[in-house]
Image: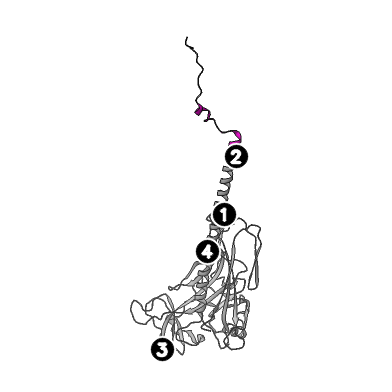
C-alpha cells in the first residue's frame, strides 16, 4: 500500500541560506561606519592640508613678486644716466619743450598744504641746498602710516589701507634714446632727461617727435623720466561677491607710475599684501653705510636738514604682511602678532598670515 502523503525531505542547503542575525547586522554597520569615518577624516585632513599649502605657496609667490618689484624700483632711485649729480638736472629753458604745467592724477601735490611739488620730474639737491624755485620731487620719498601727501594720485576709490606706509621712487632710463628721426627716436607726449657728465635738462616732447631742446649740448643722451609710487589697498581685487567694501575684499600692493605717454597709470602688483611698513637707513657718519633706520615722517621738504637726510639714505628696509585670500578653519580665534617696523599687527579674523622683510641698498645716493 502506497502512502499518498509522504513526509518531505528538507534540503540541507536551504537551511544554510538563512539571513544574518540582528547582532551580525549591527556589527557590520558599526564597522562600516567606522571605516567611512576614518576615510572621511583622512580625506578632510588631506583637503585641509592641500588648502593650507596652496595658501602658503600663493602668499610666498605674491610676497616674492612684490618685494622684487619694490626692490627693483628702489634700487633705481636717483639714477640719472651719465650724470653723477642728481641735482644738476634742471628744467629746459626752451619754451616749446617745457614740462607740462599739470598732469592729471600725478602724485606729490602739497606738503602741509603750503608748497606745491611736482611728481613728474625728480630732482635732489644733495648738497643740502635750498629747494628749487620750481618744486620738483626727490629721488626717494615715503610717508609714514599715511597717504595724504600722495592725495593727487591715491583716490578714495583706491581704498588706501590706513596706517600703512607709502613709498615713491624717481629715476630715468634704463636705456638712452637717440635724437635721430627714426623709429627708436624721441617720441611726442613723453618726458625726458637729456644728460651728460656735467649736468642736464628735463624736457617734454609735446606735439612732435624728435624734439631736442635748444639749450641741450652736444654729447648729451636722452632718457625717459620715470616716477612710481607704491601703496597698500584694502581692496586690490573684490572677493567672491564681486564688490569692494565687503568682508571678503582681497587686499594688495598697488603701483602708480608715469607712463611713456605722459599720463599716469595704476595697477595691482600683488594680491594678499595687507600691510607695508618702510624704514630708511641714514648715513650720519659719512662712511657710506646706514647708521640708523628712521620712519618716513623724518623725510620732508621743509628745510636743508631734511634735504640732507634724504640725500643720506643708503638703504631701505621693507616689511610686508601677507594674508590668505580666504579663511581657514582653526584660524578664527587664534591670535597672532606681527612686528613691522613701528607697528604691531594682531590678527584674529580667521585668515592665515605670514610676514616677510627685505633690505634694499640704494645705488645712486
Side of 46 relative to 260 (left or right): right
- Circle nearer the N terminus (1, 3): 1
Q: Describe the element under mark 3 as helix, strand or loop.
A: loop
Does the image show residue 106? no
Horizontal arrangement in the rendering, residue 215 relative to residue 332 (left or right): left
Question: Marks 3 and 4, how far apart in space?
Answer: 53 Å
The residue under label 1 is 45
Q: Is residue 357 above or below residue 133?
A: above
Q: Nearer the viewer, residue 246 or 282?
A: 282
| Crowd rating for badge 2 (residues with CA inside 10 Å; few <14, some 14–19, many 20+) | few
Q: Which mark is residue 217?
A: 3
Spatial CA distance of label 1 from label 2 is 27 Å
Give the spatial CA distance, label 4 vs label 2: 45 Å
Give the number of the mark in front: 3 or 2: 2
Would you say residue 73 is visible in this rendering?
A: yes
Residue drawn at 41 percent across, 84 percent down: 221
Q: Which residue is mark 2?
A: 27
Tell me the number on the disc at residue 239.
Answer: none
Between discs 4 and 2, the one toward the N terminus: 2
Q: Alpha carbon of mark 4 to alpha carbon of mark 1: how far?
A: 18 Å
N-terminal label among 4 and 1:
1
- Is residue 171 highlighted in magenta? no
> x and y percent of residue 22 in the render?
60, 34
Image height of 262 relative to 57, above or below: below
CB-based contact (under 8 Å), mark 3 and mark 4: no
Report the residue marked by disc 4: 57
Q: Nearer the viewer, residue 200 or 338?
A: 338
Whether residue 225 is situated above or below residue 64 in the rendered picture? below
Q: Sequence order check: which comes first, mark 3 or mark 2?
A: 2
Foreground mark, 1 or 2, reads 2
Magenta stretch: give its range: 11-25
Percent x, y of residue 287? 58, 88
Amino acid at each position: 500500500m502506497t502512502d499518498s502523503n509522504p513526509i518531505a525531505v528538507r534540503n540541507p542547503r536551504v537551511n544554510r541560506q538563512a539571513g544574518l542575525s540582528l547582532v551580525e547586522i549591527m556589527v557590520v554597520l558599526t564597522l562600516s561606519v567606522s571605516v567611512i569615518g576614518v576615510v572621511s577624516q583622512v580625506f578632510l585632513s588631506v583637503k585641509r592640508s592641500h588648502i593650507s599649502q596652496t595658501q602658503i605657496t600663493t602668499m610666498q609667490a605674491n610676497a616674492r613678486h612684490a618685494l622684487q618689484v619694490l626692490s627693483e624700483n628702489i634700487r633705481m632711485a636717483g639714477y640719472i644716466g651719465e650724470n653723477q649729480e642728481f641735482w644738476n638736472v634742471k628744467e629746459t629753458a626752451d619754451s616749446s619743450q617745457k614740462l607740462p604745467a599739470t598732469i592729471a592724477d600725478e602724485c606729490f601735490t602739497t606738503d602741509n598744504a603750503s608748497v606745491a611739488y611736482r611728481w613728474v620730474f625728480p630732482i635732489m639737491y644733495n648738497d643740502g641746498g635750498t629747494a628749487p624755485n620750481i618744486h620738483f620731487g626727490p629721488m626717494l620719498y615715503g610717508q609714514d602710516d599715511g597717504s595724504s601727501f600722495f592725495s593727487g594720485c591715491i583716490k578714495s576709490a583706491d581704498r588706501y589701507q590706513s596706517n600703512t606706509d607709502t613709498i615713491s621712487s624717481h629715476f630715468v632710463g634704463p636705456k638712452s634714446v637717440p635724437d635721430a628721426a627714426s623709429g627708436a627716436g624721441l617720441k611726442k607726449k613723453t618726458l625726458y632727461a637729456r644728460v651728460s657728465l656735467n649736468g642736464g635738462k628735463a624736457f617734454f616732447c609735446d606735439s612732435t617727435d624728435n624734439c631736442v631742446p635748444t639749450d641741450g649740448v652736444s654729447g648729451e643722451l636722452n632718457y625717459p623720466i620715470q616716477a612710481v609710487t607704491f601703496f597698500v589697498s584694502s581692496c586690490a581685487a573684490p572677493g567672491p561677491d564681486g564688490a569692494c567694501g565687503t568682508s571678503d575684499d582681497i587686499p594688495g600692493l598697488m603701483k602708480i607710475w608715469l607712463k611713456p605717454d605722459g599720463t599716469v597709470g595704476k595697477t595691482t602688483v600683488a594680491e594678499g599684501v595687507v600691510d607695508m611698513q618702510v624704514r630708511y637707513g641714514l648715513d650720519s657718519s659719512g662712511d657710506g653705510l646706514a647708521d640708523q633706520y628712521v620712519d618716513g615722517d623724518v623725510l620732508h621738504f621743509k628745510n636743508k636738514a631734511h634735504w640732507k637726510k634724504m640725500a643720506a639714505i643708503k638703504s631701505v628696509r621693507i616689511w610686508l604682511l601677507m594674508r590668505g585670500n580666504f579663511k581657514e578653519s582653526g584660524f578664527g580665534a587664534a591670535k597672532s602678532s606681527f612686528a613691522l617696523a613701528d607697528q604691531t599687527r594682531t590678527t584674529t579674523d580667521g585668515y592665515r598670515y605670514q610676514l616677510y622683510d627685505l633690505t634694499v641698498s640704494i645705488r645712486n645716493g
